[in-house]
Amino acid sequence: LHLHEALTCNGLRVNGDACCGSQGYSSSTSTCCNGFIKAGNACCGGLGYSSPTSTCCNGFIKAGDACCGGLGYPTSTRYSSSTSTCCNGFIKAGNACCGGLGYSSSTSTCCNGFIKAGNACCGGLGYSTSTSTCCNGFIKAGNACCGGLGYSTSTSTCCNGYIKPRNAC
C-alpha cells in the first residue's frame, strides 16, 4: 500500500495497512484475532502475542519458542528448542530424541533406539562417515566398499570385487 493510497475495509476508509473487519490497523505492531485488533503478530485463544518471544501452547500464551506437553507436562511447561527437545512429552537436553532420551545430533546418532557416537548407524553401532563406511553391516575404514572391505576412493578402486590402486583396473 502506498502512502497516498487509502485503505478501505468493508467499504470504509481507514488508517493502517491491513483490515480487521471494518477497522484498519498497522500489521507491523498488531494482528487481527477473531475480528478484534490485538497487539503482537500472532493470535492465541483470542489474544495477541509476539511470536519471537512467546508461543501458543494448547490455547495459552507461554514464554519461549516451543511447547512440550500432553504426556506428563502441563501446558505451562516451556523450553527452548535450540537447547532442548521434547521426548515423549518430557523436556530433555539436546536437539534430538532417541528412546525417550535427548541427545546432540552434531556428535551422536540414534541406532535402533540407542544413542551412539557418530553420524550414521551400521549393524546397531554408530560411526563417523568422514572416516568410515558400512560394508554388509560392519564398520570399515574408508568411504566405499569392495568385496565386503572398506577402501578410500581417493587412493584405490574396486575392480571385480578386489581393491586395486586407483586407475589400475
Image (tube, rainbow, N blue to C red):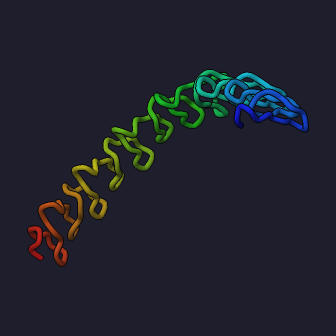
Q: Is residue 165 left or right of residue 148?
A: left
Q: Position of residue 39 (x, y in %)?
A: 73, 22
Numbered circles on residues, count: 0
Considering every residue shown, the one lying at the far right of the view is 11
Viewer-proximal residue, 136 or 30?
Answer: 30
Give the image quarter of residue 2: top right
Give the image quarter of residue 60: top right
| Residue displayed at 32% across by 41% down | 117
Q: Is residue 63 left or right of residue 164?
A: right
Indicate the quadrant containing the N terminus: top left, top right, bottom left or bottom right: top right
| Residue displayed at 67% across by 33% down | 70
Residue 38 in sight in this render? yes
Viewer-proximal residue, 133 or 21?
Answer: 21
Residue 59 in sight in this render? no
Give the image quarter of residue 58: top right
Q: Position of residue 122 (x, y in %)?
A: 33, 55
Indicate the quadrant containing the C terminus: top left, top right, bottom left or bottom right: bottom left
| Residue displayed at 55% across by 34% down | 86
Is residue 108 positioned above or below 72 on the image? below
Q: Is residue 162 left or right of residue 68?
A: left
Is residue 166 positioned above or below 34 on the image? below
Q: Position of residue 56 (x, y in %)?
A: 68, 29
Q: Position of residue 29 (x, y in %)?
A: 69, 24
| Residue displayed at 35% across by 42% down | 116
Considering every residue shown, the one lying at the far front of the view is 4
